[in-house]
Image: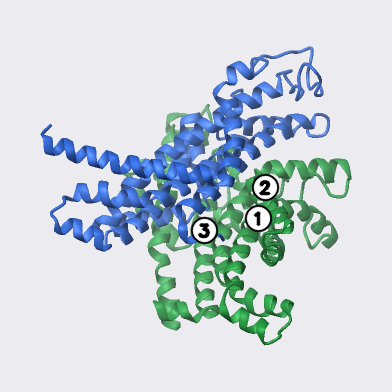
Chain colours: A blue, B green
Amino acid sequence: MTGKAQAHSAAMASAWGARARLGLGMALRHRSIRVGGVLFGFVVLLAVFADLIAPFDPNKNNFRALLSAPDAVNIFGTDAFGRDILSRVIHGTRLSLLVGLLVVVATGVLGVILGTLTGYLRWLDGPVMRVMDGLMAFPGILLAIALAAVLGPSVANAALALTITFTPRTARIVRSSVLVLKEMPYVEAARACGASHTRLVLKHILPNALPPLIVQLTFVFSISILAEAVLSFMGVGPPPPTPSLGNIIAEGRSYIQEAPWVALTPGIAIAMSVLGLNIIGDGLRDTLDPRLRNL
Amino acid sequence: MTRYIFSRALSAIPVLFVVSLVTFLLMWLVPGDVASHIAGPDATEAELEAIRQRLQLDQPLHVQALHWYANLLRGDLGQSYLLHRPVLDAVVERLPVTLSLACMSLVLAVSFGVLLGVLAATKHDTWVDQVTMTGALLGLSLPDFWFGLVLIFFFAVGMGWFPTGGYTPFAESPLGWLRSMTLPAVTLAITQMGVIARMVRSSMLEQLGQDYIRTARAKGMPRGLVVFKHALRNALIPVITLVGIMTGLLLGGTVVIEVVYSLPGVGRLIIGAIQSRDYPIVQGGLLMTAAIFVFVNIAVDILYTIVDPRVRHDR
């Protein structure tokens, strides 16, 4: 690497780094990000340390305690196979977050690539965006269910189906930022100074297109958790006996009269994750998008 | 205006083209041999070949696609594998249940959402505001199918006020129909209500800070009148767009809710068809739902230009 290239990449890294530090500092001062962070952080801890925290093996049958009500041993009771609901919910939460994370990373990467290309290259904009519009014309959850059904029930396919469903929305947000930013005087100035297209996009355009994308991805995360539960509930997500939150609810649905704890407990875990993420998302929108501040 | 309506309607054509292409390709993604699935495990090779020929599965993909579009233009969505009837008939027959469920939830969500949003905005930064907005956030964070089970547990199993599921046609008993639709509509409305309440609140706050509101108050107009006659009218304009977006959420949501409450709508038809691998029904159901969504959005856009003439001049 030449000295100039090294200096260039160091400048680029410090520009991104400074932005990240500034953003994080601002974010942590925001009350709702702290509240949401605590709520979601608790769920993340449960998921990460699921093996240590869960009192039982989530798939271990116990035929002496079928559909037993919550007690000191099984805090949230057991299901029709005598499996411990608390342990299943903790492992299900791990799976939910895993799917959500996969979808966020995949839609984020695809959204940035597609959004930047369509925003920057005129000839590509029409055809790609027509396809995106077509995909967005389906009610999201219905498209995801159909895709997951066709792809076959598995964790990876659930994530893939949700990625296909949510990428158009993410790409659209990046595209609209890029469209505005590339006409800004400072980008024009950089271009006049002889900056390459790669440098313009990576150093000048993308860093400023990120804030709305980050806000959007928080909501993609929360919607993915909800949608994964729907896919499992409909029988097109990860197949039983995988302890996914939707599967547990689907199994508990048949016993809603005699053993309501089976179906009702997993919903609380879903609601906690989603609520935490939504509160964080609101806070991020306030700090990252000044136009919406104080609304 | 006529020109705008016309051009907006024309813009639906490429979208519908992509929508139908996606539904067609979905079928092609299906793993395994469709013919052997229809004929069952005991079919002979000759029988399988006959089915492949009848469904043109032996043709190359582009020929199949051409047939698909040719049939589509004639309003033919194909034949169901299992119901042995045209897909269009099966879907159209189920539409009233789905649409009435979606409309009921929309009415519930909009009326209560607007009310809560206005309440939160007028009581800005008080405990009323905080409680309403926390409730709205909680509402849109709940998994709707799970919330449906909670309602069933409390109000159907526990109180016995509503049936735990199933459908009574309106023609048979209007009261029975209302009873069978109330819990599903409430379930579906909860999430949307939260979204609308939040939107109305922020939109109202923006309006309440405007000069014309201060003028109206300064000349002695009662606060209630200012809020409802001036601010709300303007605050509702962005909400119209939201209704278009929400139609998508509602149409998707009905699928899930119909399964939870065993309602015979398009959603349950599609899910049943997915389970029995009756793919023409899945295709037809998806296509119809997406088409409704596209047309509602066109209607919303047109409505928007009528309500807010500024948009027309901007274009």
Q: Is residue B146 left or right of residue A103?
A: right
Q: Mark 2 Cα within 10 Å, few/some/many (few <14, many 20+)?
A: many
Quadrant containing the C terminus of chain B in the rendered view: bottom left
Q: Chain of mark 1?
A: B
Mark 2 to mark 1 CA distance (whole Å): 8 Å
Q: Considering the numbered disc 3 on the image, is that residue within a helix, a strand or a loop?
A: loop
Amino acid type of the residue that numbered disc 1 sits on in the rendered structure: Gly
**Which of the numbered marks, if any, corresponds to residue B313?**
none
Discs 3 and 2 share one subunit? no
Determine which residue is flagged by label 1. B194
Residue, x 88% and y 45% (percent of image)?
B160
Give coordinates of residue A206: x percent, y percent. Answer: 31, 49
Q: Considering the numbered disc 2 on the image, is that residue within a helix, a strand or a loop?
A: helix
Task: Please report contact status of discs 2 and 1: CB closer than 8 Å, yes or no.
Answer: yes
Vertical placement of B261 versus B12: above or below? Answer: above
Q: Chain of mark 3?
A: A
**Which of the numbered marks, if any, corresponds to residue B138?**
2
Q: Is residue A255 left or right of residue A27?
A: right
Closest to the camera, between mark 1 and mark 3, is: 3
Chain-order first, disc 2 or disc 1:
2
Give coordinates of residue A294: x percent, y percent. Answer: 55, 59
Q: Quadrant of residue B148?
A: top right
Q: Quadrant of residue A163?
A: top left
Closest to the camera, between mark 3 and mark 2, is: 3
Determine which residue is flagged by label 3. A293
Q: Quadrant of residue A11?
A: top left
Examine the rendering and report whether any part of residue A30 can be seen.
Answer: yes
Q: Considering the numbered disc 1 on the image, is that residue within a helix, a strand or a loop?
A: helix
